[in-house]
Amino acid sequence: MKERNTLKIINDPIYGFITIPSSLIFNLIEHRYFQRLRRISQMGMSYLVYPGAHHTRFHHTLGAMFLMQKAVQVLRFKGVAISDEEAEALYIGILLHDIGHGPFSHAMEHSIVNGISHEDISLQFMEALNTEMSNKLALAISIFKNEYTRKFLHQLISSQLDMDRLDYLRRDSFYTGVAEGTVNSERLISMLHVKDDKLVVEEKGIYSVEKFIVARRLMYWQVYLHKTGFVAENLLMRVLRRAKELSQKGISLRCSDALQYFLEHKIEKKSFSTAVLETFAKLDDTDIISAMKFWSSNDDFVLSELSKMILNRTLLKIKIKKKAIPVAKVLEKRKQLMDRHMLTEAEADYFVFTGTMTNQAYNMSHDTINILTKKGKVVDVAKASDLLNIEALSQKVVKHYFCFPKGLGE
């Protein structure tokens, strides 16, 4: 076989040219597990609100790797010792941190697999790749699992100011056109340092951190929790849940073999074997879209209507309130729908439902963003900031939603 040239550069619309730092990382990117991310949307159903939001997990992970390269460069310049092996492990860890996402990013975690998160599946993919690549991912896995002695390395991959967040906020802002989410990732990275094995931000970067936290809050309300996208995500989860319910009853549904496997079997963390992982690796957004096109003409009213709602963007109405929705109101809407379409209460529950959505821009009780003062002290950004709203943004905001079909009145 002819040897491939691994000295590649990738042109990214956000950062310009991204270089692939090693042949091992090139081989990981070329692997079928990673190439699948080209077919997994970064923002789920948000494209139904923001037409430009069609970027993928593939885009995002490459961008996060680019930022990790910048972070290593900055920290080394400031005298933080990071070996070549540790640097490569960081690049691998951030490159593969999202490899466990299923179709439309989060939909499967809440519908057809139980008790297993995309982080768990990412780790399984990493361990499978490590076996295939002669244990060359061992250090990356150790850092990813926060088992490595130098804890600040894990913070670069997973924390409240990691390369993951620095990329997705800027990238999602770019592709949605929501300017409020723009963050200056280069400025933030240039202010990074390490103190007592903790990732810190130099005091002169505090305003960039404040902007980052505010941008995160705005992106959640305007984009990630936008009511239309939120309804669509909930409908998608209900489509998959209904399909699984019917499949478990022995009803055959037309779809890909990989999707059919997950519909017909009860998949939990303890049963997520190597064989299941291989089947999961065949799933992407196209499986779900093509299945819904078949299901839109299915005899089951619930499955067909839910599928058509997503495909045709004829979504449910949603009301968002500060207080819990009265039970009587929910029962009334459910009864109307049951009478109109001769549905059971369980079937009507797919279309009439309530719940809560939360937004916490900054968590003061977990893995805080620390500021390194000019006197050498390490202080939580919420305490160091002269903006009172940073501490206020650490409060979890809970809102109640109520979804029901249009035409059932207000």
Image (tube, rainbow, N blue to C red):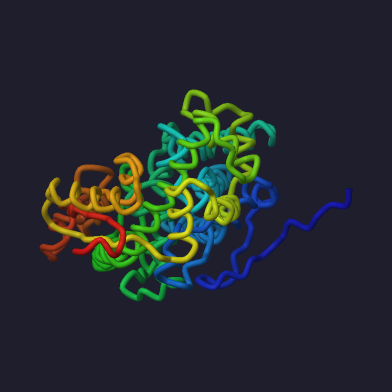
Residue 197 appears in the rendering: no
- Would you identify the image quadrant in which residue 190 lies? bottom left
Looking at the picture, tell me which residue is in the foreground, 247 or 205.
247
Q: Along the horizontal axis of the image, is 299 left or right of 357?
A: right
Residue at the image position 30 percent from the left and 67 percent from the top: 222
| Residue drawn at point x = 53 percent, y = 36 percent | 263
Is residue 23 visible to the viewer in this orientation of the structure? Answer: yes
Residue 8 percent coordinates (x, y): 70, 62
Looking at the figure, which quarter contains the C terminus? bottom left
Residue drawn at x 15%, y 52% as measured from the top left: 329
Q: Nearer the viewer, residue 7 or 347?
A: 347
Residue positioned most to the right: 1
- Relative image position of residue 64 (x, y in whole percent): 49, 57
Percent of width and height locating residue 153: 43, 44
* For residue 116, above or below residue 178: above
Q: Is residue 76 left or right of residue 255?
A: left
264 or 4, which lies in front?
264
Residue that appears at 20% across and 43% down: 365
User: What is the number of callouts on the image?
Assistant: 0
| Up/down of 356 relative to 116, above or below | below
Residue 196 in the image: state x and y as whole percent: 31, 42
Q: Is residue 410 left or right of residue 258?
A: left
Of residues 408 and 70, the one drawn nearer to the viewer in this rendering = 408
